[in-house]
Amino acid sequence: MKVFWLAVGLVLILEGLGPMLAPRGWREMVSQLSRQNDQTLRRIGGCLVVAGGVIAYIMFNRL
């Protein structure tokens, strides 16, 4: 359970860096994403899930 909360904390840190460091660029990116159709957003989300899964798999197998 500790690892889960560590992962959540790291995700929040990474997600917060965009609006903290480059608010205008982040707002433009979110605006562009909101104009995409559902299928494109699903593909983007799927790619992110797969990439996260691969990274997690690699990191847990290295420990």
Image (spheres, rainbow, N blue to C red):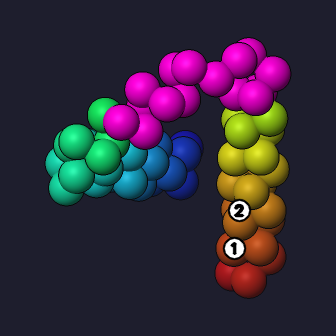
State whether the magenta stretch is mostly helix, strand or loop. helix
Q: Quadrant of the N terminus?
A: top right
The crowd level at tag 1 (other Cα within 10 Å; few <14, some 14-19, many 20+) is few
In magenta stretch: residue 44: no
Q: Is residue 50 left or right of residue 36?
A: right
Q: Which residues are magenta?
A: 28-42
View extreme (bottom): residue: 62
| Residue 4 percent location from the top left of the image | 54, 46
- In the image, residue 18 sits, relative to residue 46, either above or below, namely below
Q: Which amino acid type is shown beneath numbered disc 2?
A: Ala
Q: Is residue 9 left or right of residue 4?
A: left
Q: Dot 2 lies on which element?
A: helix
Q: Dot 1 lies on which element?
A: helix
In magenta stretch: residue 38: yes
Q: Which amino acid type is shown beneath numbered disc 1?
A: Met
For the point 80% across and 35% down, which residue is it? 43
Between 42 and 49, the one lying in front of the other is 42
Q: Quadrant of the rendered structure where residue 35 is?
A: top right
Q: Is residue 60 left or right of residue 11?
A: right
| Residue 63 percent location from the top left of the image | 69, 81
Q: Are marks 1 and 2 in contact (CB under 8 Å)?
A: yes
Q: Which mark is residue 2?
A: none
Q: Quadrant of the rendered structure where residue 60 is?
A: bottom right
Gap in angstroms between the C-alphas marked 1 and 2: 5 Å
| Residue 54 percent location from the top left of the image | 79, 62
Please say whether residue 54 is visible from this viewpoint. Answer: yes
Q: Is residue 6 left or right of residue 59?
A: left
Residue for badge 2: 56
Residue for badge 1: 59
For the point 28% across and 53% down, which residue is it? 17
Between 52 and 44, the one lying in front of the other is 44
- In the image, residue 17 sits, relative to residue 30, either above or below, namely below
